[in-house]
Image (cartoon, grey):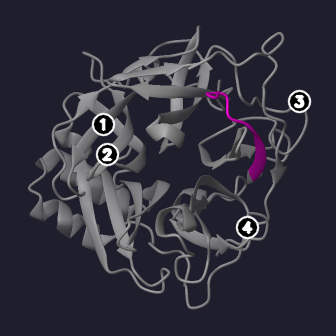
């Protein structure tokens, strides 16, 4: 992958403009975008719409924002106007509740962890986060997300499916549980990618736990599991993340681009402070990387950074992107969530630029 030519680390993508996205709480504040183009997979729109976006509402000034952070869906014909499809009720999934505790009992989780989950659900500290979309060639759309039952960290990676434009959910299941990931504090930001020949690749972030039992935010990484489908995923492989100098990985998304290349856009925060502490709000900047084998190599220069004074003046958060191949160049449509440092409002913005991995 070539190095992006920039001057004085000036980001290579122009600043984005906030999108108007309806949310069930009425705030129109949201985060965690995941966008797909169904025509690239099926050769035609899926259930009447070409573009689909998953997200979670997140009103920055509402004390209930964690409980409102539930997977939602909107659709578009043109990448500019987003609306809730007819017949769809938002959110697609509500806050964690008693049924999720029943599933934990069935999974035979450790008693101490179960008691923490009970406390989290009863005290309404539990929440959902990090939705990610994937459309199979059979016309089934998957939405994967992480769920925190106890609050404070993510306990499960869950997937739901739909065949009818999210008017109904045909299946829901827990894919991974954090306590079964060795010495792991949290799993987050899933990405489902179709294999080059067959099957599925599941990529997800993880925060390891140190010898003292505390999370190590200075060692955040990416794992991969491969299987014929989400029910037959193999063992986890920890990828070797080559981060930009002086940076710590946070949220990311993996997509297969032209030529079968696996591209990873990741947000990074300066590698400062204690390893077990996450400075909030983090100063996040977006970089581009490519996955080759078991290595993720990120570019030294940023794609996008927070604005000085605007809607995205802090926390350039979880990204999503689509790749458009023209005869002579490759363009990237980019969505990212960010927060206004002054109003604390969270929005999802859109921008585009030339693919940094093109020669």
Predominant secondary structure in magenta?
strand
Which marked residue is nearer to the observer: mark 1 or mark 2? Answer: 2
C-alpha span from label 3 to label 4: 24 Å
| Tag 4 secondary structure | loop
In front here: 62 or 143? 143
Q: Magenta stretch?
A: 349-358
| Left or right for 256, reference 233 | right
Mark number, residue 224: 1
Q: Marks 2 and 1: in contact by CB < 8 Å?
A: yes
| Residue carrying label 3 | 308
Which marked residue is nearer to the observer: mark 4 or mark 1? Answer: 1
| Tag 3 secondary structure | loop
Say which residue appears at 72% left-offset and 44% top-offset. Answer: 338
**Dot 4: few (<14), some (14–19), or many (≥20) neighbours within 10 Å?**
many
**Dot 1: few (<14), some (14–19), or many (≥20) neighbours within 10 Å?**
many
Mark number, residue 201: 2
Give x and y (percent) for residue 191: 42, 47
Which numbered disc, 3 or 4, marks the residue that appears first in the sequence? 4
The quadrant the C terminus occupies is top right
Q: Marks 1 and 4: in contact by CB < 8 Å?
A: no
| Left or right for 11, reference 335 | right
| Tag 1 secondary structure | strand
**Dot 3: few (<14), some (14–19), or many (≥20) neighbours within 10 Å?**
few
| Tag 2 secondary structure | strand
Which marked residue is nearer to the observer: mark 1 or mark 3? Answer: 1
Decide if residue 346 is in sight here: no
Mark number, residue 21: 4
Which marked residue is nearer to the observer: mark 2 or mark 3? Answer: 2
> Residue 126 lies in what quarter of the image?
bottom left
């Amino acid at each position: 992958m070539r190095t992006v030519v920039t001057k004085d680390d000036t980001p290579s993508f122009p600043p984005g403009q906030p999108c108007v996205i309806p949310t069930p709480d009425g705030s129109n504040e949201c985060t965690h975008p995941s966008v797909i183009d169904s025509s690239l997979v099926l050769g035609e729109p899926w259930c009447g719409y070409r573009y689909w976006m998953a997200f979670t509402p997140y009103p920055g000034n509402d004390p209930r924002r964690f409980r409102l952070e539930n997977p939602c869906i909107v659709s578009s014909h043109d990448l500019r106007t987003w609306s809730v499809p007819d017949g769809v009720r938002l959110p697609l999934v509500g806050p964690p509740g008693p049924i999720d505790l029943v599933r934990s009992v069935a999974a035979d989780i450790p008693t101490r962890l179960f008691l923490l989950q009970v406390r989290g659900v009863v005290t309404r500290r539990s929440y959902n986060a990090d939705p990610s979309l994937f459309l199979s060639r059979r016309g089934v759309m998957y939405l994967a997300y992480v769920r925190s039952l106890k609050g404070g960290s993510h306990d499960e990676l869950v997937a739901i499916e739909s065949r009818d434009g999210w008017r109904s959910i045909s299946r829901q299941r827990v894919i991974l549980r954090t306590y079964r990931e060795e010495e792991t504090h949290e799993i987050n930001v899933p990405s489902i990618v179709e294999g080059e020949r067959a099957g599925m690749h599941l990529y997800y972030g993880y925060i390891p736990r140190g010898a003292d039992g505390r999370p190590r935010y200075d060692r955040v990484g990416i794992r991969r599991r491969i299987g014929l489908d989400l029910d037959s995923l193999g063992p986890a492989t920890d990828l070797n993340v080559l981060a930009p100098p002086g940076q710590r990985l946070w949220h990311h998304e993996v997509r297969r681009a032209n030529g079968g290349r696996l591209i990873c856009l990741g947000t990074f925060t300066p590698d400062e402070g204690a390893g077990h502490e996450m400075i909030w709000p983090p100063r996040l900047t977006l970089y581009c990387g490519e996955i080759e084998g078991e290595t993720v190599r990120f570019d030294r220069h940023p794609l996008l950074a927070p604005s000085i004074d605007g809607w995205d003046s802090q926390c350039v958060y979880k990204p999503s992107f689509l790749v458009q191949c023209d005869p002579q160049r490759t363009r990237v449509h980019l969505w990212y969530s960010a927060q206004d440092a002054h109003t604390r409002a969270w929005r999802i913005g859109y921008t585009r630029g030339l693919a940094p991995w093109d020669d």
